[in-house]
Image: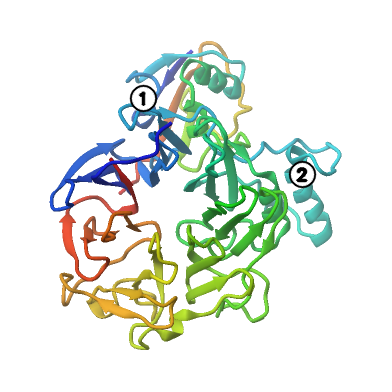
């Protein structure tokens, strides 16, 4: 399925804003992303499988707040980093 | 492996927006700035391995992303991210039998047990600590090439044996924090309850000191398996019990390389010295001028003289501006172990100089005469080439400076 990558994480995907990954749930998808782009998962998900505070993940434009969220192969995933900073 | 050597001083600078290096000529009269390395990333600590000139390491975080460590094995030409950055063990699902000494099980089970003991329920004791910041890096003992220690917020300590690629928890310390009230990260300072000042006794790699902001200083004699507080004599004005064992707020603790039993500490509540056999901190900051006080973040020691140290006092009155006292920045030096202090402000702004120098942003080089350097949150680096007597601004317009370390190239 298509995964949209926010700009702070594109150093892992060699600049790509859209990549393909698979998984029956979000955790599997993120593990597949991490296999392709080592280190990317830990920047979004902490050691207890919780989304970091300023990360939001959308599946088909609906927010999900757990890595256990189920996925289907036709789903589209957006990973968003908070816009704040300074 | 060759140790860093050369006749040029290089400052490694961690900032809020990336890392920089500042390299001098052989007489330290001109400086060349390189960088930024990883522009936009918060670099808390950046240093060269004193055991291997080619090895460099940075503790980093990028805005909203998780913390990590980057390392270089070619003197900073190329960098690689840790494949396993410092992180606490993953909490085990409920139902696993508790028991020592498996550190993987201990964390989640101790949290569950604590909930049963205290009667607290819900989110407080379900909280599982995750590393928010890798704040501090310390190279391991001379006899342990490739070993580094890292300190985190919430309080945690981690070790690598492969030069920074993979990190594992120092379970003894992390479990000690989990078992001790007030060391879970809940008493957060603005940057979190930081683990810092990890000090390895050059005589014995198993002898380690570590400090936690709003936590105290602790000592291990067995490579981090067990710990004891080492805060006797340190004041903690906000704690009702003056005899409390820990909970104090060390900002920066140093151990003298020539006499590892001599420690100095810049604390939220003053400047202290300890000779380890005494087991008690003495507030040498009481000898500072009363109108200046003895509050600050960093403390720097002379690499060869155990009696000499430098501090950068800050205003700790009322709402704690944490800027130079009276808007007149100055470095104070002791040459007698803190029994007396001398002001040095030649070259610094005589007024309206509201400098804040973070705890890791002041250092000395190893040249003779010693160079003293400090970086401000306003992005300036000031240097002294006469052992702290006078200062000039070496570079301006950098981002907020978090740390400065010195090496030779």
Quadrant of res B322: bottom left
Q: Secondary structure at mark 2?
A: helix
Alpha-carbon neighbours of circle 1 within 10 Å: few (<14), some, or many (≥20)?
Answer: some
Chain ID of residue with mark 2: B
Quadrant of res A20: top left
Residue nearer the viewer, B166 or B340: B340
Q: Report whether B46 appears left or right of B276.
A: left
For the C terminus of chain B, the quadrant is top left
Which residue occupies 81% across, 43% down? Answer: B101
Which residue occupies 51% across, 73% down? Answer: B273
Q: Is residue B383 above or below residue B142?
A: below
Residue nearer the viewer, B96 or A52: B96
Q: Report whether A49 appears left or right of B136.
A: right
Q: Position of residue B367 (x, y in %)?
A: 29, 54
The residue wearing badge 1 is A10
Q: Position of residue B205 (x, y in %)?
A: 61, 47
Does residue B375 appear in the picture of this structure?
A: no
Residue nearer the viewer, A58 or B271: B271
Q: Is residue B20 above or below residue B166?
A: below
Gap in angstroms between the C-alphas marked 2 and 1: 37 Å
Residue nearer the viewer, B116 or B250: B250
The residue wearing badge 2 is B106
């Amino acid at each position: 399925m298509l995964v949209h990558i926010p700009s702070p994480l594109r150093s892992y995907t060699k600049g790509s804003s859209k990549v393909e990954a698979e998984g029956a749930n979000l955790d599997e998808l993120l593990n597949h992303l991490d296999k392709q782009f080592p280190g990317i998962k830990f920047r979004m998900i902490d050691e207890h499988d919780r989304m970091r505070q300023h990360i939001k993940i959308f599946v088909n434009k609906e927010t999900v707040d757990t890595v256990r969220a189920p996925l289907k192969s036709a789903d589209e995933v957006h990973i968003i980093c908070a816009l704040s900073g300074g | 492996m060759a140790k860093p050597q050369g006749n040029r001083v290089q400052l490694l600078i961690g900032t809020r927006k990336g890392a920089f290096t500042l390299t001098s000529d052989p007489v330290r009269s001109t400086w060349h700035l390189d960088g930024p390395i990883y522009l936009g990333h918060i670099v808390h600590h950046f240093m060269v391995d004193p055991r291997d000139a080619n090895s460099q390491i940075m503790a980093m975080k990028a805005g909203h992303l998780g913390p990590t460590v980057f390392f270089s094995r070619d003197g900073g030409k190329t960098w690689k991210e840790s494949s396993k950055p410092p992180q606490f063990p993953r909490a085990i699902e409920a139902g696993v039998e508790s028991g020592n000494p498996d550190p993987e099980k201990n964390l989640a089970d101790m949290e569950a047990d604590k909930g049963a003991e205290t009667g607290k329920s819900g989110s407080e004791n379900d909280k599982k600590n995750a590393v928010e910041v890798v704040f501090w890096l310390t190279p391991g003992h001379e006899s342990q090439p490739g070993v580094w220690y890292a300190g985190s917020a919430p309080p945690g300590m981690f070790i690598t044996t492969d030069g920074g690629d993979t990190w594992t928890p120092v379970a003894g310390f992390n479990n000690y924090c989990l078992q001790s009230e007030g060391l879970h990260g809940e008493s957060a300072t603005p940057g979190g309850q930081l683990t810092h000042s990890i000090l390895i006794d050059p005589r014995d790699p198993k002898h380690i000191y570590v400090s936690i902001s709003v936590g105290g200083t602790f000592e291990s004699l067995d490579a981090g398996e067990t710990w004891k507080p080492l805060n006797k004599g340190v004041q903690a004005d906000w704690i009702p019990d003056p005899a409390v064992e820990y909970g104090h707020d060390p900002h920066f603790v140093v151990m003298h390389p020539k006499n590892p039993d001599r420690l100095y500490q810049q604390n939220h509540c003053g400047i202290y010295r300890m000779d380890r056999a005494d087991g008690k901190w003495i507030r040498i900051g009481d000898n500072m001028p009363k109108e200046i006080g003895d509050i600050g973040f960093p403390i720097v020691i002379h690499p060869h003289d155990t009696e000499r140290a430098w501090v950068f006092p800050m205003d700790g009155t009322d709402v704690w501006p944490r800027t130079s006292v009276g808007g007149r920045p100055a470095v104070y030096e002791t040459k007698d172990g803190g029994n007396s202090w001398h002001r040095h402000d030649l070259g610094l702004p005589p007024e309206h100089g509201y400098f804040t120098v973070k705890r890791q942003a002041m250092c000395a080089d190893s040249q003779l005469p010693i160079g003293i350097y400090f970086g401000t949150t306003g992005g300036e680096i000031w240097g002294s080439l006469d052992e702290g007597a006078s200062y000039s601004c070496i570079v301006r317009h950098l981002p907020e400076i978090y740390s400065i370390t010195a090496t030779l190239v």
